[in-house]
Amino acid sequence: MFLESMWVQGFRALAEQRLEFTAPVTVIQGGNGTGKTTLLDAVYFLASGKSFLGLANAELIRDMNPYFVVAGQYRALDAVTGGVVNHAVQAMFTSEGRKELRIDGTVYRGFIHLVGGLRVASFNFNSVFLVKGLPSARRQFINLLVASSDRVYLETLSAYTEVMAHKNAVLRQSSFTTPDMSLLDLFDEQIVRLSTAIYAKRRAALAVIDRAMRQLVSSGLFGVFKDLVIAYEPRAISVDSIRALRDRELARHACLAGCHLDDFSLLRSGKQFRESASLGEAKVAALLLTLAGAEFTRAATGEYPILLLDDLEGDIDMANLDRVLHLVTQFDQVFITSFDAARLGSGLNAQSVNL
Amino acid sequence: MFLPRRFIELSAKLGSLPGIGPKAADRLVFYLLDQSEEDIRALADALVAAKREIHFCTRCGNFAQGNLCEICQDLSRDGGLLCVVEEIRDLAAIEKTGVYRGLYHVLHGRIDPIARVGPEELGLNRLANRIRTDGVHEVIIATNPNFNGDITAMYIAKLLSELNVRVTRIATGIPKGSELEFADVFTLTQALEKRTDVQG
Ligand SMILES: [Zn+2]
């Protein structure tokens, strides 16, 4: 997977950038506020249709600009033939809320169609929430990771989202009309069917990530985490177990069971790492999880995702930084911000981008 | 503006019709103003008469000039076979295939709680009653193959599961997420012939 060129216009701090990438490592340099993180976010956007900063599309438009455009050309392995194929994607969002996405010349309405094209593994200042934050941060991580290599998973998730939206509408309207119980039954059946499928895929993916994480640790990276494991035990779900919650769901106007409430956790020596981890430890563990996620992508698709490393130097000690930089050589392409290029040493073929 | 107020008003009215943009609306006004007053009056009368005299068939929901539509009045059609569609335009698409010889039930919508349309608003009990009293032996559900069409089909299948009636759904051929009315005759014919049983 290799991003060959990019065109970014009106995207947060970036007025306009046309960039070409040839070296495996691109070091992005520039002062504060020049948009180093934003450039990584733009690459992430091409892979996910979302900002890793958690901003809505309208908030991504640069002040005074009527729209933003993020476009890129990349090459990737074709899942069917195994050959290398070139792709072109272009996403545009206007201040009136109009979305336009083109993938290899075909027009799509939703940015969700970006998922599964360009693939990234992203470490940024929000990554700490993977360890310390709410379950939603971990769900977002696992969802993008699995959906990027598994179209069925993506479709199952969209179907689930649709069921939830409709069931929530019935639950909300129940305060002024009698809800149709058979319709709620029907939604519950769908929630059970889709959640069960999603749990199975998450379980399989997390097992691979857990194994990859421990392999990375045993190879010498972040040796302090030799007792860190991923625990995943989704709550058993059945039509009966949801029906038992019906009265509470009606009272609270919310779905109280299903894969939208799912979570996985990191255990260190059998205890919840979320609670004991310092901020620094959480960041390092998040980097470990990100790299393990990249191994999952490689196992699933045959190639590494593009690695995005934002502001690495502040959080990682020297010895581990060197190990990370060694690992980085396995990736086809890496973007690093806020980094002293001299540190990379002569072994790495790097190019610099100055913003 | 060089055009008189009446012209602009009429153009705006025509331009609000589906599929007619401002330019096409202007062209229509130019055309209409070229016609004789009698022709215009005949057109206006036809519009008013259509609105006044065309209602929904009291049995199936299709357009009808009396109580019952042409299809319901056609005694050569199989009254034991009922095809459930979302809109009259879907009925029209199926009629175009020429292979279906049963009757219809037009829902005038689909279950969509977000738009506040539930089973009650769709009058699904009316459909169940019709099956009980009209001696229907098979119900073919031809709702659109998208989320709301699927939910509607599943709900109907469940609702009818207690009745002594075979419930099928047209399926294959029509791509997921698309709409029935845009399917070609061949695809729709295939979909009707290869319908599958639905368990409620
Ligand atoms: Zn009729």
Image (cartoon, coloured by chain):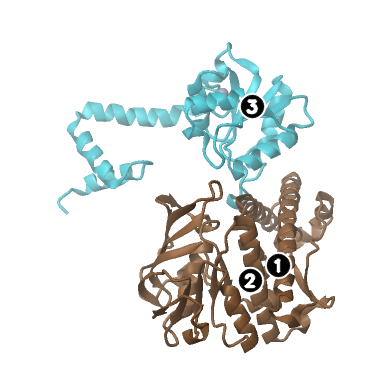
Query: Chain B is which colour?
Result: cyan
The reply to whether discs 1 and 2 touch (Cβ–Cβ < 8 Å) is yes
Can residue A140 be seen from the camera position used here? Answer: no
Q: Which residue is mark 1?
A: A212
Image quadrant in which the C terminus of chain B is located: top right
Q: Is residue A26 left or right of residue A246?
A: left
Q: Please give the chain letter of the residue carrying mark 3.
A: B
Whether the residue under disc 3 has CB within 8 Å of ligand 1: no
Residue A291: numbered disc: 2
Q: Please give the chain letter of the residue carrying mark 2.
A: A
How far apart are the two marked residues, 1 and 2, measured between alpha carbons?
A: 8 Å
At label 3, the amino acid type is Arg
Q: Is residue B97 left or right of residue B50?
A: right
Question: Which one is earlier in the sequence, the residue at label 1 or at label 2?
Answer: 1
Q: Which residue is mark 3?
A: B195
**Is A206 or A65 nearer to us in this picture?**
A206
Q: Position of residue B34 (x, y in %)?
A: 17, 33
How far apart are the two marked residues, 2 and 3, measured between alpha carbons?
A: 48 Å
At horizontal 39% and vertical 28% (from top left) the residue drawn is B49
At label 1, the amino acid type is Ala
